[in-house]
């Protein structure tokens, strides 16, 4: 395959991630919302990944940056580091993967600083000339780097903010249609809150958690000066979690997350590409956020279809061994992702390892039948020979 052909294919991948779908929705036809850099929405850790991608209100852990930075304020310990790895499309391609590195440091009893790096590699792509001679090999890649700050504002409530740099290089500067491509760059922020309170449930000690996270609120991204800029996956995540201590050694957590993308819904166009139903999607970021709640061509019914649900359960024995399961649901007209998840976790002397496994129901999934793992190190707990806690 020559350089021009490969460049065209790669640029087509960009278009697939950014082009709006224009179709009727009154009868439930496809009208999915598309954004660039969708890797930002992937669960980076195996704990939440085993619970149907639910994590905004669960107990704090080292991977709270992705789900709810505010949770860091209530995390046990003075500092820690976590790393996770997720292979993609292993049935087709051997070298596509996502890696995540995260860490936190407790400044004082009320304040925590955190950082994370998410890196996505799309494998090696060979570029050849018209005669099939190899000219160069390019590895498309994407990454985001976060800096976060969390603080306790009341006995049971904390807030958090994270700033994010996003870089996406899918074409290596190749030309497509006579236009030069370029890496996409964006800056974004998360604003989050977390509330937890000890309660009594069925005469047993329990913990109620509530969380909210406005994530990836940031600038649009473009891969070419000739291309219209597109939205990154700005998202609103709401959730609750309840943990009950069944006895001295056993505890059970049930959780649910609700997600809504804060980007425009594709309108319906006529043959002259004039909008006949819905709202103009070419708006600024602040307008898009508010417009996303009422711009669906199908009205309130379609707006409700844009909500995704994550259900999760987690069982701990003696705070050392965990079993998890979950379910993720997305409407058929908005992507049709439906899958069950399962996993396990082990914890000892400040060291935690988690596994997760995904089983798709409605369609194939890049993580289908793939085992993922995450590692977490509570640095101070390991130094003192104690166990980390959730």
Image (cartoon, grey):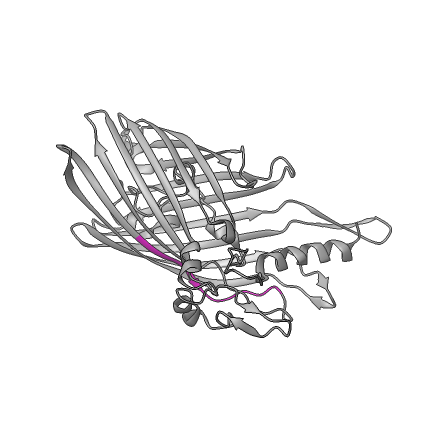
Of residues 48 and 116, the one nearer the viewer is 48
Where does residue 134 sit, x and y in percent of width and height? 79, 48
The reply, left or right, for residue 47 in relation to residue 246 is right
Is 248 located above or below residue 31 in the figure? Answer: above
Q: Is residue 214 magenta?
A: yes
Residue at figure coordinates x 48%, y 54% from the top left: 144
Q: Is residue 234 above or below residue 131?
A: below
Say which quarter of the image contains residue 224.
bottom right
* Closer to the camera in the image, 3 or 332: 332
The quadrant the C terminus occupies is top left
Q: Which residues are magenta?
A: 212-223
Seen at 63% across and 60% down, the residue is: 15
Assess whether residue 312 is covered by the magenta stretch.
no
Horizontally, residue 54 falls left or right of residue 135, namely left
Say which residue appears at 42% left-offset and 31% top-offset.
343
Q: Which residue is painted at 53% across and 39% down in the image? A: 367
Residue 222 in picture, x, y percent from top left: 58, 65
User: Residue 44: image x %, image y %?
Assistant: 45, 44
Against 355, residue 141 (above or below) is below
């Amino acid at each position: 395959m020559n350089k021009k052909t490969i460049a065209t294919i790669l640029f087509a991948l960009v278009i697939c991630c950014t082009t709006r779908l224009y179709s009727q929705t009154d009868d439930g036809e496809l009208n999915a919302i598309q954004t660039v850099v969708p890797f930002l929405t992937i669960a980076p850790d195996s704990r939440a990944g085993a619970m149907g991608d639910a994590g905004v209100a669960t107990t704090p852990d080292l991977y709270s940056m992705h789900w709810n930075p505010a949770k860091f304020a209530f995390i046990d310990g003075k500092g820690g580091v976590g790393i996770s790895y997720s292979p993609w499309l292993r049935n087709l391609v051997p070298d596509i993967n996502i890696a995540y590195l995260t860490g936190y440091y407790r400044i004082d009893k009320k304040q925590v600083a955190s950082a994370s790096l998410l890196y996505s590699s799309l494998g090696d792509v060979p570029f050849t000339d018209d005669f099939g001679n190899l000219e160069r090999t390019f590895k498309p890649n994407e990454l985001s780097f976060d800096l976060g700050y969390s603080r306790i504002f009341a006995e049971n409530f904390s807030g958090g903010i994270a700033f994010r740099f996003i870089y996406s290089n899918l074409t290596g500067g190749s030309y497509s249609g006579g236009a030069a491509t370029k890496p996409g760059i964006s800056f974004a922020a998360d604003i989050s809150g977390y509330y937890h309170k000890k309660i009594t449930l069925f005469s047993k000690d329990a913990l109620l958690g509530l969380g909210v996270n406005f994530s990836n609120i940031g600038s649009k991204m473009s891969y070419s000066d000739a291309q219209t800029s597109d939205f990154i996956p700005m998202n609103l995540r709401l959730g609750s979690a309840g943990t009950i201590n069944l006895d001295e050694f056993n505890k059970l957590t049930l959780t649910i997350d609700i997600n809504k993308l804060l980007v425009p819904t594709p309108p319906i166009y006529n043959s002259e590409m004039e909008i006949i139903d819905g709202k103009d999607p070419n708006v600024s970021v602040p307008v898009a956020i508010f417009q996303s709640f009422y711009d669906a061509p199908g009205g309130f019914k379609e707006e409700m279809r844009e909500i995704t649900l994550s259900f999760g359960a987690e069982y701990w024995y003696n705070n050392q061994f965990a079993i998890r399961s979950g379910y993720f649901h997305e409407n058929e007209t908005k992507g049709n992702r439906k899958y069950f998840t399962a996993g396990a976790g082990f914890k000892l002397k400040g060291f935690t390892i988690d596994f997760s496994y995904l089983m798709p129901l409605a369609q194939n999934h890049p993580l289908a039948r793939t085992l993922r793992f995450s590692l977490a190190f509570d640095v101070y707990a390991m130094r003192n020979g104690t166990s980390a806690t959730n």
